[in-house]
Image (tube, coloured by chain):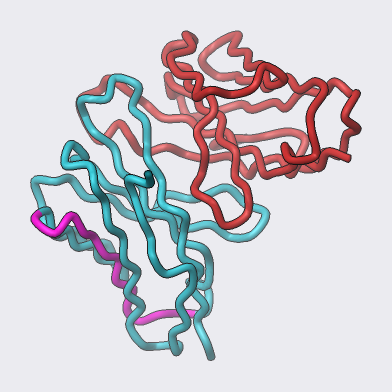
Chain colours: A red, B cyan
C-alpha cells in the first residue's frame, strides 16, 4: 500500500454504538491529522498529532477520541454520536520540521460516516 | 470569521478554455498557499502550492498567482479538460504556526462542459 489509507470507507452506526476509524500512512511522515468535511463547508480540523503527540484539539466533543500509537497509525474512536456527526472523515499526514514546504498534507480517501 | 474565502461555490467552463478559480485571505501572517482538488468520495489531492516570496508558480496546465497586497490568489487551468471537473480547495498556512495548521476555504465546484 502506498500513500494514506483509511478503513472503513463507509460506516453506518446507531447513536449508541462504539466504532473506530483507522488511518495508516506509508509516506514516512511525522504528523497526522483528522478532519471532518460536511457538505459545502470548509474542511474542519479536528485533531493534530506531531511526532505522536497531540498538539491540537479544536474544541471537538468528547464523543470523538483520537489515538496515535505511532507515527504511521491514527485512530478515531467514536461513541454515542449524534446524527449531525454524519460527515466525511478525512485523515491526512505531512512531514513537518524539515524547513521546506512542510505544510503539504496528503489525504486518505475518507470514511463516509452515517449516524442513524 | 473565515480567514480563507472562496466566494464562488461553483464555476462552469467550456472544455479547452481557461478556468480561473479565486481565493481571498484575511490573515497577513499566511505565507504558504496550496490548492487541492477533490473528486466525490475521495480525499483531497495536492495540486500546486506557492510561497509568499513568489507571485507565480507554474506546473503544466496549472498556474497559481499570488497578489499579496490584495491578499488574493488564483488558480488558472489551461486548457480545461473534462477530468478537471472537481471541487477545488484553497488552503493557507503561517510558518509561525508551530502546529502547521492549514486553513481551508469552502471550495469551488468546477464543471467542465464538453
Specify the farthest residue to the front: B1
On screen, residue A101 versus residue A32, left or right, reads left
Taking A66 as reference, is B16 above or below it?
below
Q: Quadrant of residue B17?
A: bottom left
On screen, residue B21 versus residue A13, left or right, reads left
Q: Position of residue B44 (x, y in %)?
A: 51, 50
Residue plotted at (59% across, 40% down): A108
Q: Quadrant of residue A15?
A: top right
Residue plotted at (16% across, 42% down): B28
Q: Position of residue A13 (x, y in %)?
A: 88, 34
Of residue A110 and residue A88, the one placed in the foreground of this image is A88
- The residue range painted magenta reads B69-81
| Callout count | 0
Residue plotted at (68% across, 21% down): A64
Q: Position of residue B61 (x, y in %)?
A: 31, 71
Taking A63 as reference, is B2 above or below it?
below
Magenta stretch encompasses residue A75: no
- Location of the N terminus of chain A by quadrant is top right
Amino acid at each position: 500500500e502506498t500513500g494514506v489509507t483509511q478503513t472503513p470507507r463507509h460506516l453506518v452506526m446507531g447513536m449508541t454504538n462504539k466504532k473506530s476509524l483507522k488511518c495508516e500512512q506509508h509516506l514516512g511522515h511525522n504528523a497526522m491529522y483528522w478532519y471532518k468535511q460536511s457538505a459545502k463547508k470548509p474542511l474542519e480540523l479536528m485533531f493534530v498529532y506531531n511526532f505522536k503527540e497531540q498538539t491540537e484539539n479544536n474544541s471537538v466533543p468528547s464523543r470523538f477520541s483520537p489515538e496515535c500509537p505511532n507515527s504511521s497509525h491514527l485512530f478515531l474512536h467514536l461513541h454515542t454520536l449524534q446524527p449531525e456527526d454524519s460527515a466525511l472523515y478525512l485523515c491526512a499526514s505531512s512531514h513537518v520540521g524539515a524547513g521546506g514546504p512542510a505544510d503539504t498534507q496528503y489525504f486518505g480517501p475518507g470514511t463516509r460516516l452515517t449516524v442513524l | 470569521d473565515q480567514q480563507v474565502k472562496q466566494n464562488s461555490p461553483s464555476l462552469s467552463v467550456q472544455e479547452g478554455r481557461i478556468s480561473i478559480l479565486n481565493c481571498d485571505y484575511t490573515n497577513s501572517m499566511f505565507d504558504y498557499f496550496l490548492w487541492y482538488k477533490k473528486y466525490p468520495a475521495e480525499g483531497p489531492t495536492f495540486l500546486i502550492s506557492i510561497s509568499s516570496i513568489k507571485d507565480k508558480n507554474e506546473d503544466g496546465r496549472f498556474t497559481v498567482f499570488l497578489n499579496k497586497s490584495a491578499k488574493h490568489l488564483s488558480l488558472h487551468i489551461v486548457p480545461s479538460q473534462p477530468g478537471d471537473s472537481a471541487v477545488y480547495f484553497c488552503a493557507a498556512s503561517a510558518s509561525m504556526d508551530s502546529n502547521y495548521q492549514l486553513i481551508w476555504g469552502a471550495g469551488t465546484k468546477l464543471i467542465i462542459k464538453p
